[in-house]
Amino acid sequence: MNSPQNDLLITNARLATMNSVDGDPLGVLDDGAMVISDGLITWIGAAPNAPFMDNRLDAEGAWITPGLIDCHSHVVYGGNRAGEFAMRLEGAGYEEIARAGGGIVSTVSATRAASEDDLLKQALPRVDALMASGVTTLEIKSGYGLNAETECRMLDVARKIGRERQINVSTTFLGAHALPPEFTGQEDAYIDLVISDMLPAAVDAGLVDAVDAFCEGIAFSPAQVRRVFEAARDLGLPVKLHAEQLSDLKGTVMAADFGALSVDHLEYVAQDGVDAMAASGSVAVILPGAFYYLHETQKPPIQALRDAGVSMAVATDANPGSSPVFSILSAMNMACVLFDMTTTETLVGATINGAHALGMYDRGRLATGMRADLACWHVGDVAELSYAMGATPLAWSMVGGAMVNA
Ligand code: NIG
Ligand code: FE
């Protein structure tokens, strides 16, 4: 691992600062420079005004953005679901497979059977792919353990990833992701276990930054999720929710009531949910990978979210079932092509709004005092980040002022 640079002057860069100026959300500084010290940006401005420094890095005219933020992922899991992918292509539906004991529950069996080392070994290449797409902060959820021991093992692996790689990891407890087979027909009893055993165990082990749940017909009702959120609130933890992905259960309205950091998916959200998010300031996390893989046709109401002034983030939802997508740039591209988001909206969505979806206000834009988490790109214009699929335009990235090893 590289150590943080001190008094480093980065010159000859085109900066997309993401500080909205005069209606331009990109806040472009064409001939920009930055000073990095103690892991932070300590000066930023026009190159001719930059202080003199011996230690310099020439960006050679390339673009620099804040390091990208993937605010919704499930990269720690055992096995994969390529077999289920093939079944879906032969006509089986995602919900049908889930109800027949496949889907999330099949990943639960593989995850329970995997050791901590196995889980780490399987997750690292996924994380490396995300890092190669410019990600410097990655949220990782539990949710394939569905018992205290395995949920904690998953979160422990997530935290280890942050030590094994130069990436910031934020951990989210997703115990209420699916009903484990041993609780068939006993949803409320499982929620009791989540509240009384699983969540406290993960919190006691210091492994939880936020609490999430899956509110859906194949998962949990708003009333059940509400109980989990009350427990989170009692523990002082922020909440977020997978909601209205396959139907409109009004989970969004309930989550907004709790001041959720974000509500994610949202394909079926109605105007009441949009209005509730606008009032609560929750970020709408748009996940086009799951829409794409599940051949969905109902799109999230992007225009209604815009009109209501709801901030939108874009994330990979990287997971073995509904979104085996391991590039934030691919997710940005899909959000443009499938949902007609603009290339600027997707970049805002993978930087400042992604940060806010995680309750982080020290990153996601380039300004004095912000973390020195940067991505430098070989592109002629930052629109290209959302334009190509499968391209690898990252020149270098930096986390907390330290260059990331390629
Ligand atoms: O975000 N929606 C629920 N959870 C995941 C899917 C997980 C899976 O299919 O394994 C998601 O899409
Ligand atoms: Fe998800």
Image (tube, rainbow, N blue to C red):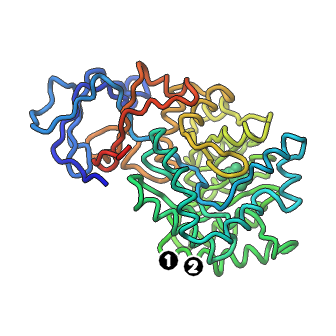
Q: Is mark 2 within 8 Å of ligand 1?
A: no
Q: Which residue lies under the disc numbered 1?
A: 205
Q: Is mark 1 within 8 Å of ligand 2?
A: no
Q: Is residue 129 visible?
A: yes
Numbered disc total: 2
Q: Which residue lies under the disc numbered 2?
A: 201
Residue shown at 38% from the left, 46% from the top: 363
Horizontal placement of 195 versus 401: left or right? right
Residue 196 spot, x, y in % from top left: 65, 81
Q: Is residue 23 visible?
A: no
Residue 86 spot, x, y in % from top left: 82, 44
Amino acid type, residue under disc 1 in the picture: Ala
Horizontal placement of 15 versus 34: left or right? right
Residue 352 spot, x, y in % from top left: 45, 40
Question: In terms of depth relative to the viewer, which is nearer, 106 or 66?
Answer: 106
**Which of the 4 image quarters holds residue 338?**
top right
Residue 80 spot, x, y in % from top left: 70, 54
* Tag 1 and tag 2, C-beta contact below 8 Å: yes
Residue shown at 35% from the left, 44% from the top: 373
Measured along the vertical axis of the image, is residue 192 above or below residue 282?
below
Amino acid type, residue under disc 2 in the picture: Ala
Measured along the vertical axis of the image, is residue 281 above or below residue 235?
above
Residue shown at 79% from the left, 46% from the top: 246
| Kind of element beneath mark 1 | loop
Q: CA distance from mark 1 to mark 2?
A: 6 Å
Measured along the vertical axis of the image, is residue 20 above or below residue 374?
above
Can you say which quadrant of the picture contains the C terminus?
top left
Can you say which quadrant of the picture contains the N terminus?
bottom left
Answer few, some or many: residues within 10 Å of disc 2's Cα (few below 14, many 20 plus, some between 14 and 19). some
Answer few, some or many: residues within 10 Å of disc 1's Cα (few below 14, many 20 plus, some between 14 and 19). few
